[in-house]
Image: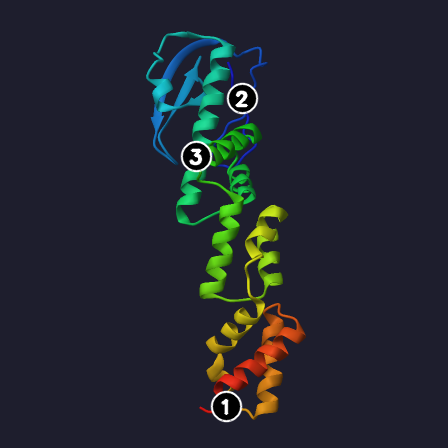
Amino acid sequence: MMTPRSTGPAHGLAPEFSADNDAGAGRITGIVIKKTPFKRAAVMVDGHLAVYARPRDAERLHTGDAVTKGALADLHRCYQDYGAYRQAVRFLSARDRSVREVRKHLRAKGWEAAACDRAVERLQAEGYLDDHAFARRWVDMRCRTSPRSRLAVIQELKQKGVLREAIDAAVACMDEAALALACIQKKARQWERYGEDEKERRIVVFLQRKGFSYAVGRKAAQAYHDLTKDD
């Protein structure tokens, strides 16, 4: 009898199957449909769990059928591809992700490396996973909702595993001066009670925390002063 070992999380998403297992051939003694975390079939061989299978593959199986090691290996590989892809789609449904984020998530969920690679490749071919597009959207989001320096955005994208060429292309259009001024304007009220010298000092320190250089911070503070001096 074949009892797969599990090296992934306790929920048993991806039991480890070895086609070299000498006990890999036998007779199907049960097919149990499970609906968590998504619909799948647990295939029992000689009374023990052998592999999980895609629902459509399970439809071709019947209790009492003889099954070979090779057939079980095929079921396992197809299930891994099916499950890893479904897991990736679910992960992407919440928001954009980088390639590395998706691959890391799938591995953490227990899917085999080869299945993770195939899921990523499929999503890339379908246009749902693209680090260049991800980086562009990330930069656009930052510029519109939470402006910060080019350096800060580069570091964020690096942490997400985006390729440097994709990062460089995405940040090339960022206007540091405009972004620094936008940062100031979003927080302008907190400096209203200070004199000009103290206001400038606080603005520069604030911008440095956002990743802007001292020189950019000084210029932005001066630009803000020029815009508001007649208010």
Location of mark 1 (residue): 229
Between 19 and 156, the residue placed more toward the observer is 156
Residue at image position (53%, 69%) is 179
- N-terminal-most mark, 1 or 3: 3
Q: Nearer the viewer, mark 3 or mark 2?
A: 3
Q: Where is residue 165 in the image (x, y as percent from the top left)?
A: 62, 47
Q: What amino acid is found at the position of numbered circle 3 in the picture?
A: Glu
As helix, strand or loop, the secondary structure at mark 3 comes to loop
Q: Position of residue 151 (x, y in %)?
A: 62, 62
Residue at image position (37%, 16%) is 30
The quarter of the image holding the C terminus is bottom left
Q: How crowded is mark 3: few (under 14 residues within 10 Å), some or many (20 or more)?
A: few
- N-terminal-most mark, 1 or 2: 2
Q: Distance between the residues labelled 1 and 3?
A: 53 Å
As helix, strand or loop, the secondary structure at mark 1 comes to loop
Location of mark 2 (residue): 17
Q: Which of marks 1 and 3 is in front?
A: 1
Question: Which quarter of the figure has residue 61?
Answer: top left
Q: Position of residue 121 (x, y in %)?
A: 51, 32
- N-terminal-most mark, 3 or 2: 2
Q: Can residue 179 be seen in this view?
A: yes
Between 26 and 215, the residue placed more toward the observer is 215
Identify whether 110 is placed above or below 192: above
Q: Is residue 50 visible?
A: no
Q: What amino acid is found at the position of numbered circle 1 in the picture?
A: Lys
Q: What amino acid is found at the position of numbered circle 2 in the picture?
A: Phe
Residue at image position (57%, 59%) is 153
Query: Residue 126's mark?
Result: 3
